[in-house]
Image (cartoon, rainbow, N blue to C red):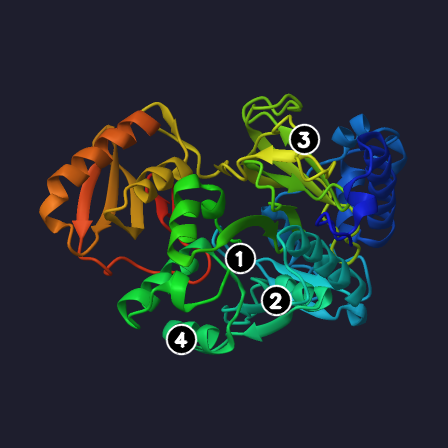
Amino acid sequence: MDDRGCWNPILETLPLEKLFDLQLRKFKNILHWSYAHSPFYRRLYKEAGFEPGDVRTLDDVRLVPKVEKSMLRDTQQRDPFPYGDILAVDLEDVTVFRQTSGTTGTPVYHACTWRDWEIYTECWAYILYAQGYRATDRVFVPFGYNIFVAFWGGHYAAEKIGCEVIPGGVLDTAARVLKMQELKCTALMATPTYVLGMAETARNKLGMDVARDLQVRKITCAGEPGASVPATKKRMEEAWGAKVYDHIGATEWGAWSYECQAQPGGLHVNDAFFLIEIEDLETGKPVTEPGKEGKMIITALDQQTKPCIRFDSKDVIRWAGRSCECGRTFRLIDGGVIGRADDITKVKGVLLAPTAIEEVVRSIRELGDEYEVAVSKKGETDDILLKVEVRPGCEGEQSRILTRLKDQLRLKTNLGYRIEVHPFGSLPKYELKAKRFKDLRKKGA
């Protein structure tokens, strides 16, 4: 660690050519490990006529068959229970169980040995240190400490840095706010939805001025793209009087990207632990130029227990093509995760990203934090229903607010919407991942 904000200044400022050499060596190692120890990967590669020795350069990585989440669900039907034959260690060596949230289907079970969990935590330490967490911080973690990975890695990493960590566990939202006030917590980790929800509870139920009455000065978000959506970030920062930082991770591979204190309009890829590829959404060809959106293919370079090699994440990102003033050589993705390939869908012939709707709704101060979107078929035509809440005291301006909302939606997304106004506080609230966008045209939606 050093005063420039690097947890590992050697790796975080490594020249790119050396960083790419490191990635290639690590990729070869995890490839050979998986072929030797994971029946799932050995079967996958043999069926494709692929041998680990076929990879000699980073360009050769594209020869390796990709993995999708449905394949992980299928392998769970095999022994050893409950992970399936993707496991590359003996079952008795597994020390940590987590599972995905299930927002995209049946949960996937994830296993770690203590070695892999230490790496998971180390990746989080890069994040928190880059965002200004130090041993002097008292960090509040308000999630339910269940089998979903949530902020478990953040908790362990904060302790590793030397922070004092306060678990919010079984407390309700009001009790969590009061505990933060009592203990003078300086930092918070939560989803954007819950960050806004806590501020609303503090204001409306406890009569607090959050920025004045609490001492939180930095917030790390995860689970949703909101902290990289400018309007949502602004709402959170204004509500708390704190800096809000984004991070991106997943149960299956860990914390792969983070925003630093310089906040360059993008997030660093943790290139020391992950190999990120971007593929064109339609052709599947590699995307290397800045500014072009594509689907992320990720490899966790050090994950041995349940290897993650060329996993099709469905996350849509784009390279930023610029360096960051913080001095890190780790590459930047522009604006965080733009959306999921599963969610970016054609409506009336126009590509629609749910984050574009979030940016519009959250940019209008008179609207509440919660909203819902449903796309359905009305005869032969696509229909978009947007449910919103108008803040108390703004009801008399509803007509003007809705006109502005429709105009901004048309401008940002090139689409028209049916708008429903619901009573303030009536739309669902979430602590973890919010489920605001539903495409009812899809089978099973």
Circle 2: residue type: Asp
Residue 293 % position (x, y):
55, 27
Left or right of 173? Residue 73 is right
Q: Residues within 10 Å of mark 3 (few under 14, many from 20)?
A: some
Residue at the spot of label 2: 137
Residue at the spot of label 1: 218
Q: Residues within 10 Å of mark 1 (few under 14, many from 20)?
A: many
From the viewer's perspective, is the residue at label 2 or at label 3 nearer?
A: 2
Residue at the spot of label 3: 323
Q: Secondary structure at mark 2?
A: loop
In three-dimensional space, the C-alpha distance between marks 1 and 4, rounded to whole angstroms, equals 22 Å
Query: Which quadrant is the N terminus positioned in?
Result: bottom right
Q: Is residue 166 above or below residue 440?
A: below
From the viewer's perspective, is the residue at label 3 or at label 4 nearer?
A: 3
Circle 1: residue type: Lys
Query: Label 3 near label 2: C-beta < 8 Å?
Result: no
Residue at the spot of label 4: 172
Q: Secondary structure at mark 3?
A: loop
Count of residue discs = 4
Q: Secondary structure at mark 1?
A: strand
Residue 372 % position (x, y):
30, 48
Residue 268 % position (x, y):
65, 40
Q: Residues within 10 Å of mark 4 (few under 14, many from 20)?
A: few
Q: Is residue 362 above or below residue 119?
A: above
Along the line of sight, the residue nearer the viewer: 64 or 221? 221
Based on the displayed image, in which of its 4 quarters is residue 23 positioned?
top right
Left or right of 339? Residue 426 is left
Circle 4: residue type: Asp
In three-dimensional space, the C-alpha distance between marks 1 and 3, rounded to whole angstroms, equals 24 Å
Q: Tag 3 or tag 1, which sits nearer the N-term?
A: 1
Circle 3: residue type: Ser
Can residue 258 be seen here? The reply is yes
